[in-house]
Image (cartoon, rainbow, N blue to C red):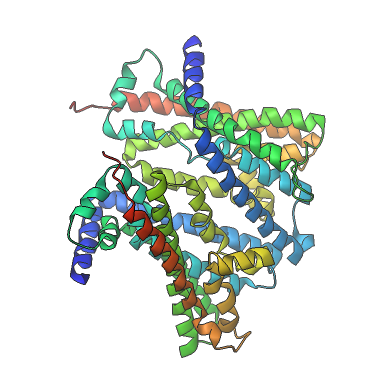
Amino acid sequence: MRAIAAIFRADFNQHIQYRASALAGLTTQFFWGFMYILLYMAFLRSNPSAFPMTQRELMSYVWLNQGLLIMVVIWFVDLRILDDIVKGNVAYELCRPMDLYHYWFIKSVSRRLARAWLRMVPLFAVAALLPQPYRLMPPYSLLHGLAFLVSMLLGFFILNALTMFLYAGTFYTLNPTGIRTLMAAFMDLLSGSLIPLPFFPDAIRRLLELLPFGSVQNAPFLIYSGHIPTERILPTILLQLFWCLVLYAWGRLLFARMIRRVSFQGG
Amino acid sequence: MLRLYTKYLDMNLRAQLEHRQSFVMMLLSQALLAFSSFLVLQILMQRFGSVGGFGLDEVMLSFAVTWMSFSLAETFVRGFDRFSVLIANGGFDRVLLRPRSAILQVLGSTVDFSRLGRLLQALIILILIAVRGPIQWDFLRLLTLSNMLVGGFCVFAGLFILQAGVTFFTTEGLEIFNIFTDGGREFGSYPMLIYGQLMLRFFTFVVPIALFQTYPLAYLFGRSQNLGLVFLPLLAGLFLLPAYLLWRLGRRRYESTGS
């Protein structure tokens, strides 16, 4: 546990240095956020009765998605780890007196958290000051706000557990770009990154909400804005907890089996 | 010059086919990316029926043209898209030493054929539209469509060259360009008019994406008989001019990174 905390601190401090890059990224994300909003508004005007969310819920969703982007998309992975796997440097990592799964998991967590932290603070600050109807409003209620924090934490855990499957996939295929693009394409669609899940047809939406991908951002963002009513909060969080446990156990099993099979050719 | 370029193409293709499995995987994942964006478009259009006065067929055509021209530009102008790598590792010094056009060499340095995966999806959509039959195809309309693709290719190619030109000054690639390249593709999937007059003007006069999708749509679907719309997309080709000038300016004051 002490080792985990130390790695987290070191990695977090390293990644929090990238301030200029965060600032550049911020401009980009504001633009994307605004364009998405304009797009949704165009659909809203065309057929208001078909719109599945309120305007306020939509704005929360778009700005939370932009501000927390790095904490909710799979493609922001540590390229160095992928490189280590392909080039065989992973042999060094295996010499460490620490489980590889936990080591990479905590590296993924600290890297994403540090980079997200740099972007989210200024982005939320500005988004909260925008003129109506574009403004990011506070959570629906105090309860929803607290539930959002819990749900976001669980969602973040699930995302990192899924990232471990990406690393495992790289071990098997040795083609990090291919597997990363493939997973990103699936995740962007199924997690509600391209459009919030309420926009899907009802039957598909219900299915997607049950899959682990829907737990990453769709669940916490909809809790925040109150789209998920009070009585649905507990079942939503329990489902997230379920996926945390399943994906964690499954990932560790996969890693254990994989590491037994790994062979190095030296060099 | 053309012979040299075909040599480059041949070289790139053969290099990429060496890793056949990886190549196919990349091709498929590119196609999947395009497919999921198209799926989203279908879901939204099914739910709302129309957007900003445009029906499903018009939006589908806008999507197909934008993605097709983006995919072509990303395949053949990839060398400029990845130019920051060439600057950072000193590869551009070697380019300048050779007695051949620098532009040709940068173009030839990377031709990424797996990027054609997106084209595949766009082609299928074009065929779908043709089968659904909302457009009365004749010579002028086919010409309009090909002009749209040419115009689109020029705009995206221009963006990649512009991005490379800026790299001369900054050494690092700029994430901001992603607004216009990836953003142009994503938001250009819909006619630019739906984002409002301000955005339409921006995407007409600054980054002329609307020239090859929003305006000529009216002629293709018979909503306007104005023959000027047939050739309007070619005007987007002018976008290459400032891109080229900036690149030339940057090349003049290029200093090696020394690596």
Closer to us: B142 or A105 = B142
Q: Establish if B231 lies above or below B172.
A: below
Residue A183, given in percent of the width and then of the height, sits at 46, 44
Q: Is residue A202 visible?
A: yes
Q: Is residue B127 visible?
A: no
Rendering quarter of residue A42: bottom right
Residue B48, given in percent of the width and then of the height, sits at 70, 64
Identify the residue shown where x is 58% and y is 42%.
Answer: A26
Identify the residue shown where x is 56% and y is 47%.
Answer: A28
Residue B94, given in percent of the width and then of the height, sits at 21, 50
Rendering quarter of residue A50: bottom right
Residue closest to the far front: B253
Rendering quarter of residue B2: bottom left
Instruction: Name the quarter where the C terminus of chain B is drawn.
Output: top left
Tell whether A18 sits left or right of A69.
left
Instruction: Name the quarter where the N terminus of chain B is drawn.
Output: bottom left
